[in-house]
Amino acid sequence: MKKTQREYKVIDFPPLTAEERAILEEMASRPTSEINCDDIPDSAPNSKGDFYYIQPVEMPKTDIRAKIDSDNLAWLKQAGRGYQKRLNSVLRWARQNNCPIATL
């Protein structure tokens, strides 16, 4: 069975208005105890080895050729198919968590 690929369009959202910024700032000033987090999914890796993050639209992809250490590739492949997607998820997680790439 051939997998079909979904196509998504990248959305260029308009900048926030002053009113929208004020709402977000008011929400950010609330103490954590007032925030109900019961419906937020865990951010831990799931059983498939993927990293969880919210990505509402598919990002454009660029084909590259790169060399990777064999042990890192084996680690990505140990969960089965989809190792390239997992590699991209690991890189995205590192970027979103301010991994100090300049010092590596």
Image: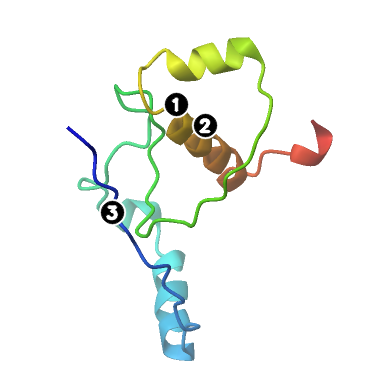
In the rendered image, residue 73, in percent from the top left (x then y), is placed at: 55, 17
Q: Do the residues labelled 3 and 1 touch (CB within 8 Å)?
A: no
C-alpha distance separating marks 3 and 1 = 19 Å
Q: Which residue is drawn at 34% across and 58% down?
A: 56
Quadrant in which residue 72 is drawn: top right
In the rendered image, residue 19, in percent from the top left (x then y), is placed at: 42, 89
Q: Residue at x 41, y 83 (%)?
A: 20
Seen in the picture, residue 86 relative to 4 is either above or below; the reply is above
**Image-based side of 36 in relation to 12, left or right:** left
Amino acid beneath label 2: Leu
C-alpha distance separating marks 3 and 2 = 20 Å
Instruction: Identify the residue under disc 2.
Output: 87
| Mark 3 or mark 2, whichever is nearer to me | 3
Instruction: Identify the residue under disc 1.
Output: 83
**Image-based side of 7 in relation to 51, left or right:** left
The tag on residue 6 is 3
Amino acid beneath label 3: Arg
Q: How many marks?
A: 3
Q: Are marks 1 and 2 in contact (CB under 8 Å)?
A: yes
**Image-based side of 64 in relation to 7, left or right:** right
In the rendered image, residue 49, in percent from the top left (x then y), is placed at: 37, 23
Amino acid beneath label 1: Tyr
Residue, far front = 2
- Dot 1, crowdedness within 10 Å: few (<14), some or many (≥20)? some
Of labels 3 and 2, earlier in sequence is 3
**Image-based side of 22 in relation to 98, left or right:** left
Q: Which of 98 and 25 is in front in this view?
A: 98
Image quadrant containing the C terminus: top right
Quadrant in which residue 46 is drawn: top left
